[in-house]
Image: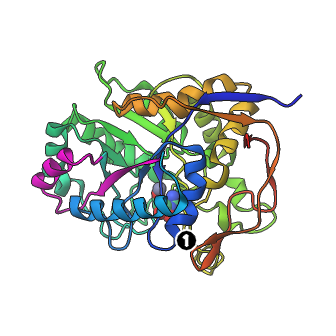
Amino acid sequence: MSKKLIIIRPDDWHLHVRDGAVLKDVLAHTTKQFARAVIMPNLKPPVTTVDLAKAYRSRIDTALQQLGVSNFNPLMTLYLTDNTSADEVRKASEHQIIGFKLYPAGATTNSDAGVTNIKHAYPALEAMQKHSVPLLIHGEVTESAIDIFDREVVFIDRILEPVRKDFPELRIIFEHITTKQAAHYVRDADTKGKNTLGATITAHHLLMNRNSLFTGGIRPHHYCLPILKREEHRLALMEVATSGNPRFFLGTDSAPHPKGEKESSCGCAGCYTAHNAMGLYAEAFDSVGQLDRLEGFASFFGPDFYSLPRNQDQITLVQQAEEVPFEFTLGDTVLVPLRAGETIAWSLAK
Ligand code: NCD
Ligand code: ZN
């Protein structure tokens, strides 16, 4: 008999929905599963001010209305720059901005306007600590001399640890962690009993290692940042995600890109998982016999960390293979989802 799992409706604590005509297409997938999502601000130009976030939020709301969705809450972030002022941070804290996102300049898709030197952001970090606004971190250094597989680990020593020392009360989310070192750093950090360090983990980093980039040839749809790592790292992520430790929670980092921009001589970074993210996470947790830990990871630890109420309604996941189409519509183009043309072992009950 196929297994079934009923859990409190989950939230996605790291999501890219882009802008304009594509909003509707990607939100349709996310809103079937999740009640809330932290919306990444790496648009072109980036969402750097409260006013820009409000305008973005209203475009998202319009798309939700067009979809007939009334039970989904986008949680807006601002993009931290070298010039983010303490005043903008104060304003953010008064307008339900969930946090500021640190992209080291050049680290990933649309990060050119990111922080060039963490010291430049110190006045903003000071204000975030004061107003209790969380810092969401893309944790990779950007120096081309550092091997791409080592950039997250180097970031911990060079940036994360000093920032935590300098701002001990700042609430930090180390997003989409990909290494054993990051998993253990977050697990073992002494936060003096305070809720100051959490991490999100994607479904694709729980399910794939770096071999998936090259299975039978180069696989552009498995290329994301931070890049997939060795199997030992995947295993460490699985261990902490399924451990019941509330510092680790769900963030898909589902990142839609047009098919042509992935299948290109210089393909961009990002995996699209929103079509059945919960099925992918269930598959991962089930693979180690830890399905009963999925609800905490997906539905409890995120809101607890952000001091938001947990959701009250439920979703039902069933162990029923779902075929993934080769493509989904993305505005006037298409995207290729993770597992395109294959199956995901779990799905949302219809
Ligand atoms: C993200 C995107 O496409 O915006 N890409 C990715 O590979 N994860 C940006 C990001 O979160 O790094
Ligand atoms: Zn992302």
Q: Hey, which quadrant is residue 83 in on the image?
A: bottom left
Residue 17 seen in render: no
Give coordinates of residue 98: x percent, y percent: 31, 45
**Residue extending farthest right:** 1
Left or right? Give the position of 55 relative to 149. Answer: left
Q: Position of residue 331 (x, y in %)?
A: 56, 75
Picture layout, residue 11 above or below residue 221:
above
> Residue 223 or 97: which is nearer the viewer?
97
Q: Residue furthest left?
A: 87
Which stretch appears magenta?
Answer: 72-97
Q: Residue at x 18, y 59 (%)?
A: 84
Helix, strand or loop at label 1? It is loop
Q: In the depicted view, which residue is nearer to us: 284 or 295?
A: 295
Residue 134 x %, y % = 28, 41
Q: Please say if 104 is above or below 251.
A: below
The type of residue carrying mark 1 is: Cys
Residue visible at 48% across and 28% down? 300
Residue 91 lies within the magenta run: yes
**Residue at the location (79% across, 43% down)?**
345
Picture quarter with the C terminus: top right
Please give the name of the residue rendered at 31% of the width and 38% of the height, measured from the top-left corner.
Answer: 161
The residue at the far top in this view is: 193
Q: Quadrant of the N terminus?
A: top right
Height in image: 322 above or below 241? below
Residue 348, percent from left and from top? 70, 42
Whether disc 1's CB lies below 8 Å from ligand 1 is answered: yes
Q: Find disc 1 in the rendering and name its residue.
A: 268
Based on the picture, tell me whether residue 52 belongs to the magenta stretch.
no
Judged left or right of residue 281, residue 215 is right
